[in-house]
Amino acid sequence: MDFLSCLFYLFVTWISIQALLSFVRCKRLPPGPIPFPILGNLLELGDKPHKSLAKLSQRFGPIMSLKLGQVTTIVVSSANMAKEVLQTHDQFLSNRTIPDGLHACNQDEFSLPFMAVSPRWRDLRKICNSYLFSGKVLAENQSLRDKKLEELLAIVNEHMVKGKALDIGSAAFGTSLNLLSTTIFSLDLVDPTGDTARELKDSLWGIMEEVGKSNLADYFPLLKRIDPQGIRKRSTAHFTKIIGLFDRNINQRLQSRKLPSSTTYNDFLNTLINISEEDSEVMDKTRIERLFVDLFVAGTDTTSVTVEWAMAELLNNPEVMSKEQAELDQVIGKGSLVTESDITRLPYLQAVVKETFRLHPAVPLLPRKAIAEVEICDFTVPKGAQVLVNAWAIGRDSSIWDNPDKFMPERFLESDIDVRGRNFELIPFGGGRRICPGLPLAMRMLHLMLGSLIHSFDWKLEHGKSVVLEDKFRLTLQIAQPLLAVPRPHI
């Protein structure tokens, strides 16, 4: 055999081995539906992918693979598989695929929820955990939360006096927004009932809607340059408006700090400016603005939609509402306000919140991305694959929950399951190193707002109206029709 023939033989052998290895790796992917040419399994997602994927998992099992355009996607739909992703292999599955809409205004370079695990990401997490969400800081800011709660109850009382229905989600959104703005800026950014509140709410919700949409550019990278659905263009308008608002507030603070008789603020903005003056590599003005975008987008919508879902379920289950009001009347006493120190003495209220999380997780699909090839239950998760943990499906898994579609808080009264990422049957805040840093604040606000709304007022739907428990999928799982209810005196 001459040299060229030998070389050709080796080349063919190498190609054959590579093809065989590729075939073997492909065969080791989790099972899943057969993809169509080009589109893959995109058509099977529909407008409610959390439900479509849950239905597919009943056919293909708790770990399955799909081809979404050019993106290999692994979907897990059981508590055991979620533990594999969020705990066992967390080190290699901690990054996230960045939606194309998040490239607007280069937000992807700064976004804490989507930034790759890195020294900068760790610095931002540490800053948030130390100066915004720590137990010490939350204790110091309790009076702020009490004040925002009083303002919420005043709005509800005004509607009660006028006999008007209240948009519960909108009211909870305004309260969450102003709580954050007071904690960060020492001022209310908006009048919860005014036009500015609606404009800012529209921009924040606009970001959630655009980034959460099914975007062809996310599945076919070549399309990113042309933005075929205009998602990045519309996202840019929303981001620009919000960043401009934060920019004005930061500039005002920077100017006031230069005055000899300036007020000394003890808020998060002041802390971040101090950090930026000490180390501009860790924090600067642009990073401050973009961190605020993350905090307001993630911190207002997730809390308000959970309050809205909880109230919708309670209005749809009056016997549960009666039980909760009885607990509050007994523990708090009629005419008294709910305080944060009362929460530990209200097990049924805690169960109501957990049950709302189970049925209506604010983020139904928890996204991850493989930075290395990982083996899970003899299946391969390829490097670069998108990984989705279907928290919605896990919350309705009949092998875990009795009567999984029924709103039944009693299931948690004798249960040790919590939401802090240790019990993978209930993961509304995610788990592992990517667990939501705002969990401590969210849990306080949810119990405080929900308990106060139930304890201070009775509620009824407008005449002829009924509760519609349909959802719509965005980055958060929102109720399809805003919940309108009329507050009445609690007798």
Image (tube, rainbow, N blue to C red):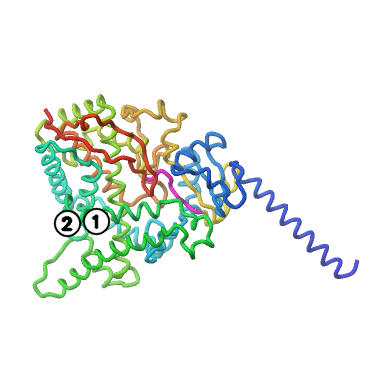
Q: Which mark is residue 199?
A: 1
Question: At x 18% / y 35%, what residue is drawn?
Answer: 486
**Label 2 SS:** loop
> Picture coordinates of residue 117 (x, y %)?
43, 59
| Residue type, label 2 | Asp
The reply to whether the magenta stretch includes residue 368 is: yes
Q: How many marks?
A: 2
Nearer the observer, 316 or 133: 316
In the picture, the disc for residue 165 is: none
Q: What are the residue bounds of the magenta stretch? A: 363-369
- Residue 2, quarter of picture: bottom right
Distance CA(mark 2)–CA(mark 1): 15 Å
Left or right position of 256 against 3:
left
Residue 156 position within the rendered picture, expressed as x and y whole percent measured from the top left: 15, 41
Residue lying at 22% horizontally and 33% vertically, measured from the top left: 346
Tell me the residue that label 2 is attached to: 188
> Residue 429's image quarter?
top left
Q: Is residue 396 visible?
A: yes
